[in-house]
């Protein structure tokens, strides 16, 4: 097995690396501290085609693959995770449900705008009190006279309240299955639909330059044709989206972990203590070596999961492993980098200060570490 990049993938990686270093890193700290969404950066990413990477050219995409998206996410997250999660959520969670399960009309209507980055899509799954129990959906959608009427609340929804947010696809209970369990379907709701309100903008520990809001639906009506995929298959569809998304989040986590290495190597060469650069001391060398080993191992894990996915092989277990290993690496590396920087690592204006604040959510979002362990155990045949 080899994990060498093709010429096309390597060219993409270098292009995004340069963009992150020259266009994102110098300015993102200001957006982060103000809690402001970086519209100019997102617009540039759109013009680069990053939002269209894994989508067909017929819908305005770049005709690439999901691995290309992961490479872009890794390089962006080496500079900043708020920008990376904006891309990840816009593609993997906003546009991908339409691409995977939408009708031809839905694809032709929405994908060109989403691929261009002129518009963002959101993914409404999590609900207050639901957390990891994503099947405990309370939002309802009733069909009558050719229209769905949606009522309920979604929380922690990325890209849901920006000036360019165009739609959110939500899971909702649309009936009862023969076995008595709720029938869950996916409904596409365009922004600005009467009855849809963007609620509170969360005050977050990290990802401060990304957009995260609560969404409230009160007798929100949309046409029957806004059903995404099959009725009653919404939960299964979103599980598939989450399996793919875990690979993308793993790539993002690897980028953060590698960014911690980059910053620590640079700082260790500049900072002097007791007459020498701190990079000459074995304690610092060992700490950075461990950081590099964690990032390298996590990268191999997400490369493997992505390769299995693109080959059409089962990848649920490998995606869970990649997400678990990579999020652990990000958290451990952020802690270690902060220690290498000492007091300066505790300052918000330093990249490692932001990395430390951003790392924790990677052990929670798109499936907690506990959920990943549960999925791995089930794939090994252990009882549910």
Image (spheres, grey):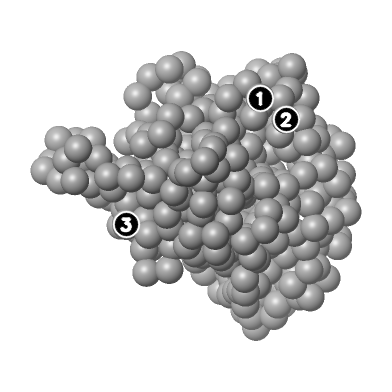
Circle 1 Cα neighbour tier, 10 Å, few/some/many (<14 / 14–19 / ≥20): few
Residue 103: percent from left, percent from top = 58, 25
Number of other residues with Cα within 10 Å of mark 2, as a class: few under 14, some 14 to 19, many 20 or more: few
Quadrant where the C terminus sits is top left
The CA distance from mark 3 to mark 2 is 31 Å
Instruction: Specify which label sits upstream in the sequence, 1 or 3.
Output: 1
The span from disc 2 to disc 1 (Cα, nearest Å) is 6 Å
Of marks 3 and 2, which one's residue comes earlier in the chain? Answer: 2
- Where residue 127 appears, as percent x and y from the top left, is 44, 62
Q: What's the distance in space between the residues labelled 1 and 3, CA to CA?
A: 30 Å
Image location of residue 108, percent across then percent down: 71, 25
Q: Which residue is mark 1?
A: 105
Residue beneath label 2, please?
Answer: 109
Using residue 369 as the reference point, say whether residue 285 is left or right of it: right
Please report the residue visible at 62 percent of the width from the left and 74 percent of the height from the top. 200
For mark 3, give the secondary structure. Answer: loop
């Amino acid at each position: 097995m080899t994990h060498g990049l093709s010429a096309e993938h390597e060219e993409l990686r270098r292009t995004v690396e340069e963009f992150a270093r020259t266009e994102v890193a110098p300015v993102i700290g200001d957006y982060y501290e103000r809690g402001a969404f970086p519209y100019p950066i997102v617009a540039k990413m759109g013009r680069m085609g990053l939002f269209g990477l894994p989508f067909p050219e017929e819908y305005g995409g770049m005709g690439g693959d999901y691995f290309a998206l992961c490479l872009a996410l890794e390089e962006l997250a080496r500079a900043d995770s708020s920008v990376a999660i904006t891309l990840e959520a816009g593609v993997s969670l906003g546009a991908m449900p339409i691409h995977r399960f939408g009708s031809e009309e839905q694809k032709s209507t929405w994908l060109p705008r989403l691929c261009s980055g002129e518009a963002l899509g959101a993914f409404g799954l999590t609900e207050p009190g639901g957390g990891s129990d994503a099947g405990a959906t309370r939002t309802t959608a009733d069909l009558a006279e050719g229209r769905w009427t949606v009522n309920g609340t979604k929380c922690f929804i990325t890209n849901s309240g920006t000036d360019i947010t165009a739609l959110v696809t939500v899971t909702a209970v649309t009936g009862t299955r023969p076995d008595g369990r709720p029938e869950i379907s996916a409904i596409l709701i365009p922004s600005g639909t009467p009855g849809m309100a963007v609620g509170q903008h969360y005050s977050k520990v990290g990802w401060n330059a990304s957009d995260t809001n609560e969404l409230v639906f009160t007798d929100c009506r949309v046409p029957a044709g806004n059903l995404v995929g099959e009725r009653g298959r919404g939960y299964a569809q979103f599980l598939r989206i989450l399996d793919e998304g875990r690979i993308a989040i793993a790539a993002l986590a690897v980028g953060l972990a590698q960014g911690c290495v980059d910053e620590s190597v640079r700082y260790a060469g500049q900072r002097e203590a007791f007459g020498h650069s701190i990079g000459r001391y074995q304690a610092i060398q060992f700490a950075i070596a461990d950081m590099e080993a964690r990032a390298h191992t996590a990268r191999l894990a997400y490369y493997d999961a992505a390769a299995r996915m693109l080959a059409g092989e089962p990848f649920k277990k490998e995606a869970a492993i990649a997400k678990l290993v990579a999020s652990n690496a990000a958290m451990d590396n952020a802690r270690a980098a902060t220690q290498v920087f000492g007091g300066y690592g505790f300052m918000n204006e330093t990249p490692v200060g932001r990395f430390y604040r951003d790392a924790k959510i990677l052990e929670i979002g798109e499936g907690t570490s506990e959920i990943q362990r549960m999925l791995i155990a089930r794939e090994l045949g252990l009882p549910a």
